[in-house]
Amino acid sequence: MDSFAQSVYRTESVAEVIALYDEHCTTYEKRICEEGKFKGPFTLVEAVTKEVPECRRKEVRVLDVAAGTGMVGEALAQKGFTNLDALEPSKGMLEYLRSKNIYTNTFHEYVGQDHTNVPQGCYDLVFVVGGMGYNHIPFTGVLEFVRFAKPGGLIMICMRHDEEDYMSNLKKYMNSLEEQQLWKKEFSTPIKDYLIGTDGILFVYQVL
């Protein structure tokens, strides 16, 4: 695994993880994404373009959670999406993605236990790629995703599948939100070699 990726997943606190992303914001895309080590962004873009027809892409309002350098937003913009917002806890990453002039609104926020300042019920699509996991967004953070979305909106979660305790808790929590009729599962699909030989998974839910 890449040394940066190793450092991120060995780090003991969210603050330290954010500091690592700050430090590597200008080299992240080349080290992790451009060399084909991280398939998550490409998987997400493919899923979004299948779900949203070209005729609706200019009107659909999208929130990119843990947006990083804005690589996914950049790819979606190339596919015709024009109403993109970003949420990112790393100041360095946020400044980097702002330089691309893709996003309408940007939020320097971390999705944790409390509400963010992102407005409620505004988005047709909320997605996160690589932001879920140990020392990243807690599994309970998906409830905030539900708050971001409009009724009928889609939530897509693209993540690694090897953190057993985290994944077990996440699936239980997602099921509990479905039992509360806050959302319904549309589908999930495995992702082979999601991140440097580690498999992943894509979850897609619709908010009720």
Image (cartoon, helix red, strand yellow):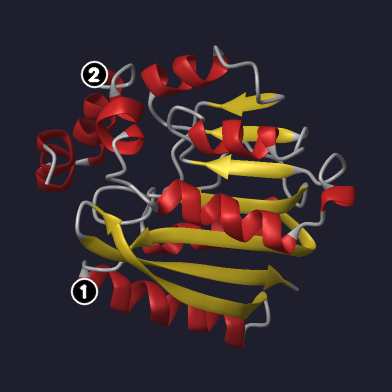
Above/below status of 71 relative to 126? above
Q: Position of residue 55 (x, y in %)?
A: 90, 49
Query: Which one is in front, 26 or 164?
Result: 26
Above/below status of 95 relative to 116? above
Residue 113 in view, yes or no? no
Find the residue positioned furthest to the front. 35
Q: Mark 2 points at which residue?
A: 23
First-in-chain label (1 vs 2): 2
Above/below status of 206 relative to 78? below
Q: Is mark 2 on a helix, strand or loop?
A: helix
- Dot 2, crowdedness within 10 Å: few (<14), some or many (≥20)? some
Residue 164 image label: 1
Find the residue positioned furthest to the bottom. 179
Q: Where is residue 66 in the image (x, y as percent from the top left)?
A: 46, 40
Above/below status of 148 relative to 35? below
Residue drawn at x 53%, y 39% is 72
Residue drawn at x 30%, y 78% is 168
7 on left or right of 34: left
Query: Which one is in front, 4 or 118?
Result: 4
**How many discs mark residues in the rendered view?**
2
Query: Which one is in front, 125 or 114?
Result: 125
- Residue kind at label 1, given as amino acid type: Glu
Rendering quarter of residue 93: top left
30 on left or right of 103: left
- Residue kind at label 2, given as amino acid type: Glu
Q: Is the C-beta separation of discs 1 and 2 under 8 Å?
A: no
